[in-house]
Image (tube, rainbow, N blue to C red):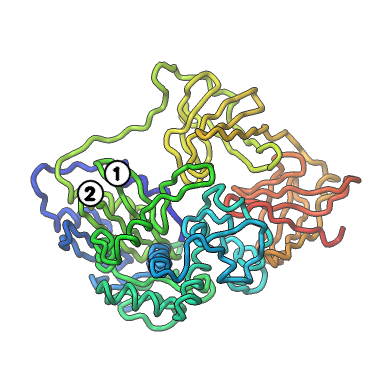
Amino acid sequence: MKLTSSLAIIILSVTAVAAQAPDLSAEVDKVFAWAKKSEPGCAVAASKEGKIVINKAYGSADMEREVPISADTVFDAGSIRKQFVAASILLLAEEGKLSLTDDVRKYIPALPDYGHKITIDHLLTHTSGIRDWQPLLNLAGGDPTAMSMILRQRELNFKPGDEWSYSNSNYVLLPEIVARVSGLPFSEFVKKRIFEPLGMGSTSHPVDPLYLIKNRALAYSKDATGWKMDMYLGNDRGGAGGLFTTAIDLVTWSDALMDNRLGAFVTQKLREAATLNNGRRLTYARGLSVQPFRRGGTLVWHSGGAAGYSAIAAHLPEHSISVAVVCNQDGGARSEYSGRIIDLLLPGSFSDVRPITTAPGVEQVDLSGKGGLFFQEGIGQSLQIAVDNNSLVVAGAGILVPIGADRFRNQRPRPTFLSEAEFELKFLSADRIEVKTKEGIVSHYRRASSWTPTTDDLKALAGTYRSDELLATFEATPTKGGLNVQANHANTVEFKPVDKDTFQVGQSLLRFKRDSAGKVTGLVYSNPVLRGVTFTREDS
């Protein structure tokens, strides 16, 4: 259910397009030539100037019963649901039943008071700072609900409006607000106010996908032994339900937005860029991303993933084109599919856009010694820098362009790194860097110190740590040069030392805390979407 970076392929993909109108059916078949009748596949639909020009299906909807995917096959569209949630909020706002500037606690008073006002618009734009429920549930013991875990959190990732961070928690709270304001369950509200008026007869938003859904495709994933069913059910859905729809219904929806069929206010606000407290405008709007399109105009889109299901819906208002691809096997290439379909519908040809590796007038600089792990001073957030193919790469930000011997800038701002900032990175020394955004926000980072813990060092860190916010227990035991951390007496992962009292695996960090006497009292767990969760040592 996460937003995928592979959608950049839509903007940068290379597809030769004949000057004359192609045979669409044959060309679309080529895009999905990989699909086999006996295996999971996709359905694809597209419109141009309001007319359906593509509506095709490939692969199997039910491998056990050999049911083929058809144009009527229904898929779980994952996070594409967010634009329908946002539209529902906007309909109520237009009617004066709520305001986007309202405090969320006006409608959900059980949400903790974080000392900062969180507005409905903060939820819509992923600028609330509320932690994402998915990693919360992944770490929690027992079987709590997404809503209960959201309400347990006593800290935010950041002050509302200061940053952007994709959090599914926002879109658990929003349907609840719709229900409390309208007096209807969200599934009924969206049916009566959106699906039925727009003629989306195959679309529903059930709270519990265990109930029957007509024409539903099963979803699959493949491992070394073969295909297996892979679907989010029950509590895995977060308790807010899911969007089950067809490719053709998603095209109908996109066309309706372009025609303002829900009203100009709804369309305008859905596409209106979110703005941070520092004035920076983002490409994320409200349940939709809006980006410049490589062939002119704007691309309005959102992807979705739910276990084995994957989907994307996109439209180009200036070109009057809508495209949707829904699949029952997870694959980031769905972005490539939609990009190729768009190219089929646009006349003319275009050239590949190559990334810039060096700024004009700057020769290739010496990158030796510049890679490594750095920590933000005073905060402790990590920054991973690597040298790859003679380029400096920052994890999450991509390739940096040299603008001097020790100065670099990012090529393309990304929402997931520094909230889509344009920034300059400067090496103040071999071990200290400065990052300065276009708005003048400056952060300093120091290189992680080399630390090889002794056996006694590791024994001092061993123990049981508990977080009441996460309902989670970590059991830390020494290994040869690291720590095994067992979560909730289940999964065990080895963390390696990267700095004094700091251990890492992947993008997860553990930083141990000590009192004034040097005794270990707890630890702080962080990952890119879950910052600064405190665990207290139980045996301290």
Distance between the alpha carbons at the discs numbered 1 and 2: 10 Å
Q: What element does badge 1 sit on?
A: loop
Q: Residues within 10 Å of mark 1 (few under 14, many from 20)?
A: some
Disc 2 designates what residue?
A: 318
Q: Which of label 1 and label 2 is nearer to you?
A: 2
Q: Quadrant of residue 474?
A: bottom right
- The answer to whether residue 394 is seen in the rendering is yes
Q: Report the residue at 23% width, 62% height from top.
A: 45
Disc 1 designates what residue?
A: 293
Residue 124 coordinates in the image, percent (x, y): 47, 59
Q: Report the residue at 66% width, 73% height from top.
A: 142
Report the residue that reaches farthest toward the left: 20
Q: Is residue 458 left or right of residue 207?
A: right
Q: Quadrant of residue 427?
A: top right
Q: In the rendered view, would you say 45 is above or below 526?
A: below
Going by the numbered disc 2, the residue's amino acid type is Glu
- The answer to whether residue 81 is seen in the rendering is no
Q: Quadrant of the C terminus?
A: bottom right
Which of the marked residues, 1 or 2, is nearer the chain's N terminus? 1
